Amino acid sequence: MKQLTKAEEEVMQLLWELQKTNVAGIIEKLPVPKPAYNTISTIVRILEDKGFVDHEKVGKGHVYFPLIKKSEYSNQSINKLVNGYFQGSFKSMVSFFMKENDISLSELEEILNKIKDDKI
């Protein structure tokens, strides 16, 4: 799966949220200052070329929808992060984030309990 630019990810986040929308619907959800219509239209076409998005013709326009699930992309991005910065070790990644973000023992216990609950 290809990696997305920051702008492409921002548009994909909105498509995952909205499920189906046109370019105007994407622009409506973006913060001020709003980007130009042509800018978002170009990003959506790039996402289509990369296989992340498809469209259906509705009237004279197009309605876009994601082809890739958010969870699929998230998983791929996390694996790339772990492999690229932590030599494939999730343990090293968790240790790094604990140290860098000063996670308390009680917060760690909450995380472990959440993991246990989700696994059972």
Image (cartoon, rainbow, N blue to C red):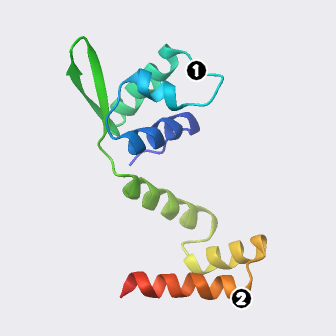
Query: Based on the displayed image, in which of its 4 quarters is residue 22 positioned?
Result: top left
Query: Based on the displayed image, in which of its 4 quarters is residue 99 positioned?
Result: bottom right
Outermost residue, top side? 60
Residue type at the position of mark 1 = Pro
Residue occupied by mark 1: 35
Image position, residue 4 (x, y; %): 49, 41
Seen at 46% across and 39% down, the residue is 14
Image position, residue 27 (x, y; %): 50, 25
**How many numbered marks does the figure carry?**
2
Residue occupied by mark 2: 105
Label 1 Cα neighbours within 10 Å, binned few <14 / some 14-19 / many ≥20: few
Seen at 55% across and 15% down, the residue is 36
Say left or right for 46 vs 20.
right
Element type at marker 1?
A: loop
Q: How far apart are the two marked residues, 2 and 1, measured between alpha carbons?
A: 44 Å
Residue type at the position of mark 2 = Leu
Image position, residue 8 (x, y; %): 50, 35
Name the one closer to the observer, 31 or 46: 31
Say left or right for 80 vs 86.
left
Image position, residue 45 (x, y; %): 38, 25
Say left or right for 83 vs 73.
right
Label 2 Cα neighbours within 10 Å, binned few <14 / some 14-19 / many ≥20: few
- Vertical order, 23 against 77 (above or below): above
The quadrant of the picture occupied by the C terminus is: bottom left
- Vertical order, 113 against 51 (above or below): below
Element type at marker 2?
A: helix
Counting residues from the start of the chain, the first of labels 2 and 1 encountered is 1
